[in-house]
Image (spheres, coloured by chain):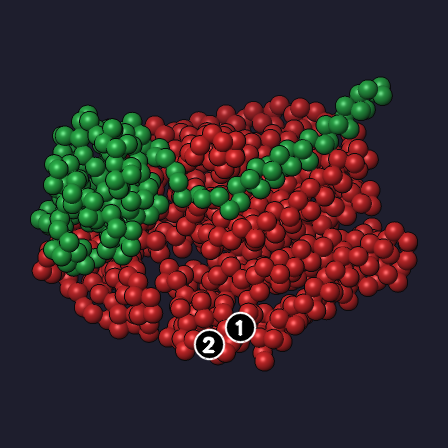
Chain colours: A green, B red
Amino acid sequence: MTMRHRLIKKALLFIPLVLFLILGIAFYSQLGKNTQYMPSALIGQKVPAFNLISLNSDQIITQDDLPNTPYLINFWGTWCPACHVEHPFLTTLADDGVVIVGIDYKDEKALAKQWLEEKGDPYLMVLMDEIGHFGVDMGITGAPETFVVNSSGAIVYRLQGVVSESNWSTIQGYLK
Amino acid sequence: MLPEIGQFSLILSLFFAISLALVPLLGYWKNNQLLLATARPLTFIMSTLVLMSFIVLSLSFLMDDFSVLYVSQTSNSQLPIYYKFSALWGGHEGSLLLWVLVLCGWSSAVALKIRNLPEDIGPVVLAILGMVCSGFLSFLIFTSSPFIRLLPDSPIDGGDLNPLLQDFGLIVHPPVLYMGYVGFSVAFAFAVAALITGNLNAAWARWARPWTTASWAFLTLGITLGSWWAYYELGWGGWWFWDPVENASFMPWLAGTALLHSLAVTEKRGVFKSWTVLLAIFTFSLSLLGAFLVRSGVLTSVHSFAADSTRGIFILVLLLIFVGGSLLLYAIRAVQVRSSVSFGVTGREAWLLLNNILLTVLTLTVLLGTLYPLLFDALGLGKISVGAPYFNSVFTPIALLLIVFMGVGPLSKWHNTKLNVFLLPCIISMVVSVLISGSLVYAYDLGLLAWLSLSIAFWVVCLSFSDWFSKVSVGTKGIIPRARQLPRNYYGMLLAHLGIVVSLVGVVLVSINSQESMVRLSPGEQTSVAGYEFRFDRLEQVQGPNYVSDKAQFTAYKNGQVVALLYPEKRLFNARQQVMTEAALDAGFTRDLYISLGEKLDGDSWGVRVYVKSFVRWIWLGGLLMMVGGLLATLDKRYQRRAGV
């Protein structure tokens, strides 16, 4: 073995260390970052199949019952403080003719009914996702979350957090 | 007073841990027998002190001492006594104390067995374990002390243990899992000691092997328990989610499996030395990485403890010291432990090399899938999530290939294998397995993927049997005496390999042959799923120790015969006003019936989810077989002998 070969062999042994250090730097840069924001993997795809019970009619609703026009899917729950903030804006949207499908996420039926009676119902329909299966399928991490579905039935945008004046113009841009 | 004693003995144990890390190494350097001899007593004192503070914390939990912040966060006076005890590891601080206790347990076990090692290596191994203990003890004391008090304003009652964790699964899953995770630090200590002393030979591998195998067996059991717990407790019948934290336990398992096999080669043939050492470091690093991912909040997961970036930085520093340090040592010293023995391409060495390559690729596949979102974001490319589709499509083919080779490998002989050793058994096994699985698939209408997977399963079973038969059928004595002479090691391997196959059958059948249905039912009504009739008999309110529950009774019928009574519940926990779904299941060898109550609808009707899951038990049965195989191999007589005898 020549001197050169030996040096290369020695250098090879440092590869694991170098790889580890690169990984360490990547970890360090991630510490303390907000891990909540996450665009959806469902962009461009149809709404996943589901069968959920409607809050209003107690009928089982599947993906075939969704509107054919552009609409919003809004995950909410009476337990979610931010949803209280979001609710009045959703109501004004509904008054302007925006179609919103509500998913009552990990919630209780009686509470949800009371909420809608007291605050008004901006939703075309409200589906009960009490265990959160549909939330898992949609990849949500909490409530509120809103998805925009276009006229051909594809999910085109996802927003984590409250729908409000400040981001409505962006959302509206996708709603067609 | 008690919590202060606990805190004090923790701090004291850190002093002993640091001494353990330094004194024996100094003794090794100066060649001083007296200093080397301190390793054992230091280990025992350190471990006793940690045990003391563990006992103190348990007492604080059992006596409902809510002046202790950690107790007030994770326990409640209404909790049944066994959950009060297990609530100790229901949060970050206590589970870290459990981690340290388990680490001390392993260190003491090594100290007890130290006589089997040459005099200078044992103390160095203990010193490395002392370093690991010092790291985790400082982490515990400086960032996560479980003994912090809420004085003078201590709450009257505690915030309660998360209802999800109030379950038998949580009593046993973390301790067993930690036994596995932490056990790999012994293999790591052996590897680093080998690098320091330059003493890496077949005997070294023989000492390291039982420790590695035992940790592997515990980790296997821990993962199996975790999967089983998720299945019945999370209420939607899934058994593996490729969640970052599940991956964090699965990666050390994969790397540890590779390590087991490469240690075998190093012991028997003296090759792969440098690689084995690297694998030992890699396996331990993955355990640490798991701790980092769970406790730092860099990834979102259902298992995460409350995110805290100071803790994250502390573990990152620990990672840097242990992994960076040992890899640096490896880079400098590994040249000296390289092996120069050659082997043929048909020899068992080559088969085990193949095993190692595939397992390493699998580990890296999971590692990449787990860290990809994080690295992607670190490079400023935005956020993405990698889900089950990635893992299923990349992991499954490689794993199936590995299992195919797993059938053949054990037939091979060291150094070189004659072709006719493989030829006949392989041809017969292939024909038999394709035919049997083909007829099963035809009879039950299962499809192509099932045919492939079941063929692979039968292939391994046939080849394992033919290997066993070839070993017991030669020679003068009868089959049974010869079978009894085969080492435990060998039977351990057979069992573990069969375990893999049993799990494979479970995984395949449960994913392609299960049925589920979501229906609306009132008492008296019934629904049918996969040939079973489920009747909703009645619903009643039940008072539990710390919850009230809506408890339903379902009767399952098949062909008019009663098969099982099922009692799914909806529990409302008093302390947190949190509703939990308790699924009911009827376990069977070939199928599970699984009912979970959804939402209460109008009147007395409920949304009900019903599943019939094929062969789901086999997934965990396989895990148990692997664990028993691992323990059997650990108890092989060869490891009981002293060094040099």
Left or right of B335 on screen, residue B437: left
Residue B545 location in percent, x, y?
33, 74
Q: Earlier in the sequence, mark 1 or mark 2?
A: 1
- Residue type at tag 1: Arg
| Real-space Cα separation, disc 1 to disc 2, in angstroms | 8 Å
Front one among B531 and B472: B531
Left or right of B176 on screen, residue A12: right
Output the chain of dot 2.
B
Q: Residue at x 69, y 38 (%)?
A: B278
Residue B24 location in percent, x, y?
82, 57
Residue A116 location in percent, x, y?
14, 53
- Dot 1 lies on which element? loop
Q: Residue at x 62, y 34 (%)?
A: A22
Q: Residue at x 65, y 59 (%)?
A: B138
Residue B149 is labelled as 1
- Are tags 1 and 2 found on a single chain? yes
Which residue carries the number 2 mark?
A: B154
Output the chain of dot 1.
B
